[in-house]
Image (cartoon, rainbow, N blue to C red):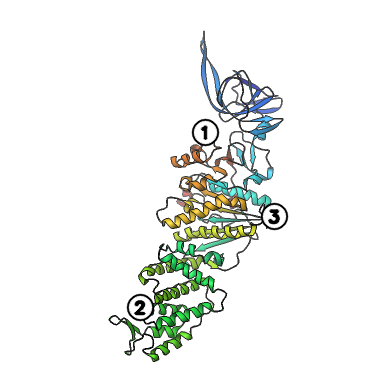
Amino acid sequence: MSIAIGEVIAVKGVNILVELYEESNKETLFYQGEKFKGVSIQEHILIKRGFKDIVTLVQGEYLDERFEQEDGKSYVRKIELKPIGYYDQGEFYEGIKHLPMIRDVAYLMNEKQVRQIYGEADDSFVIGEILKEELPVSLPWANLFNTHIGVFGNTGSGKSNTLTNLYTTLFTNKLQALNGKSHFVVVDFNGEYTGKQLINDRDFKQVYDLDTRGGGDSKFPLSESVFWDEEVFGILFKATENTQKPFLKRVVSGRERFNDTPDSLGIYTKKTVARALTSPSPKKEFAELIREIAGLVDAEELKQNISRLRWHGVKSHFYLNDANHLNGGDTDPVYVREFKQLVENITIGNLNHFAELRLRIHVQLLADLVNGYVQFDHIQPLLKRIEASLTSLERVFEVGANPVNKLLTVVSLRKSNQEIKKVIPLLLAKYYYGSHKDEVINDSPPSHTFHMIIDEAHNILSIQSNRESESWKDYRLELFEEIIKEGRKFGFYLTLSSQRPADISPTIMSQIHNFFIHRLVNDRDLMLLDNTISTLDSLSRSMIPNLSKGCAVITGTSFDIPMIVQFERLEKESQPDSGDVDLQMLWND
């Protein structure tokens, strides 16, 4: 049994108007030992239509004049309701299937009935309580973590705490079950998760604190296939379409073609330098390139002797600064033999991948100049950009190393420069998505899952950045758009956290399944939510600009109806390092 509070007096589409009884204005009521919340905004009301029980939500209320008595006017209280679901044989179903009729009676709902709407709370996955009813709410974790998730809110609204709460609760309850079956990677722009957050046990957590200033020794292991990619090189080094990208393609394709040949790079280097020295049509850039190559392969004698070469501008030939010897094919056998012997003494030791790339680029450029394929002035700007980028990349990547396969990997970019902050997430996504897809390509459903968590996602998924080239922006957006559109089939899921959802690609936003929305006040952000989230009702949307800290609207495919939840605050050591500065303590005398 329940408490009747009024009758339906109007039904206009899905808007229901109920006239309340005079005695229904209490805040809390008790009936037969059960607790009932009174009638107010966002409360749940049950309307009986024959044998059907229609569940509605209070959208608004007002007073209406009824008649005039001797002691003054009398008013009646009316409320506007919106149906959100119905009960069928004791089970709650979301959606509008039945509507009431005039004179149907409305009843209050007890806590047990309300709890059934939002799912019975699993004590192990409680992350907070429903704001209005103050009932504990549990995550439907089995349906939530196999979807793309978005956590959005202004600075200080509690979104970092929510993100941490979600995964801390998951790891706390499922740590052993997840190990070996799933992998979680956090791209941490501000170093908020490098401590005891998420997982306290270092047997399950690997942290890479990447420092482009050269002060750290933590480097992320990257596979060869991801690094030696002509498209990635073209994007990283901002190569021009018609000249520089084809040049980089020749560098990569040459390595792939002769990768199985012993000492192929050494043979290619010797032949190219010898051809340049004996070319019948030399160019003045040959000497500088050979000098750079000699420095890269540690051929000090060749480097010193090349310094003796001078360019004769009139005759377009080299000559020695201590003699009048000109090169040019076989015109001076002594000169040719002298340098050829030095070239034959070139030995290439164990180069790391960055040193190999530098050497291959210089050798390829020398070969292209000998063959007349390129002009030096067109490639020289690329060499400067490559050198500048490789200096930072070499400090944060270890190419060819085996990654540490722990349950959770945190990649902190707090100490990285702006260029690396854009590069790292792109390379991580390319590396992990490609390797994971190859592992599960024959499994249906996937035998294990991958979860990539990107905090401050607007840094890399923005469509309005003016600090990068269009080709770079297109490439990274296309990669992440492919992941968010196709990743679910392979068990690859994204969790995005951002202060500015309007800056993120609309394609990416439209593919997010579940949303945790904290306070947002910008009109563009709110408009985006209206256009993106079909499950967000108008009342919940209207509350977003005024939500308190730690309070969020939760909606999406894993939830029957939108919920407004106050998230629990984590223990101090588990909170992300994103707290406000305590000025009272800082400035205290």
Of the two numbered discs 3 and 2 in the rendering, the one whose residue sits closer to the viewer: 2
Q: Which residue is mark 2?
A: 283
Judging depth in this view, the residue of 143 and 215 nearest the camera is: 143
For the residues labelled 1 and 2, the Cα–Cα distance comes to 72 Å
Foreground label between 1 and 2: 2
- The single residue placed furthest to the top in the displayed view is 70
Compare marks 1 and 3 and give the one earlier in the sequence: 3
Is label 1 in a helix, a strand or a loop?
A: helix
User: Identity of the amino acid at label 3?
Assistant: Gln
- Identify the residue under disc 3: 176
The percent coordinates of residue 499 (x first, y second) are: 48, 47
| Dot 1 or dot 2, earlier in sequence | 2
Badge 2 element? loop
**Residue type at mark 1?**
Ser
Q: What's the residue type where badge 2 is placed?
A: Lys
Residue lying at 42% horizontally and 77% vertically, measured from the top left = 292
Seen in the picture, residue 404 relative to 97 is either above or below; the reply is below
Give the image location of residue 163, x and y in percent. 57, 48
Task: Say whether residue 3 is visible.
Answer: yes
Would you call the spot at circle 1 few (<14 residues within 10 Å), some (14-19), or many (20 or more)? few
Q: Which residue is mark 1?
A: 538
Does residue 577 appear anywhere in the picture? no
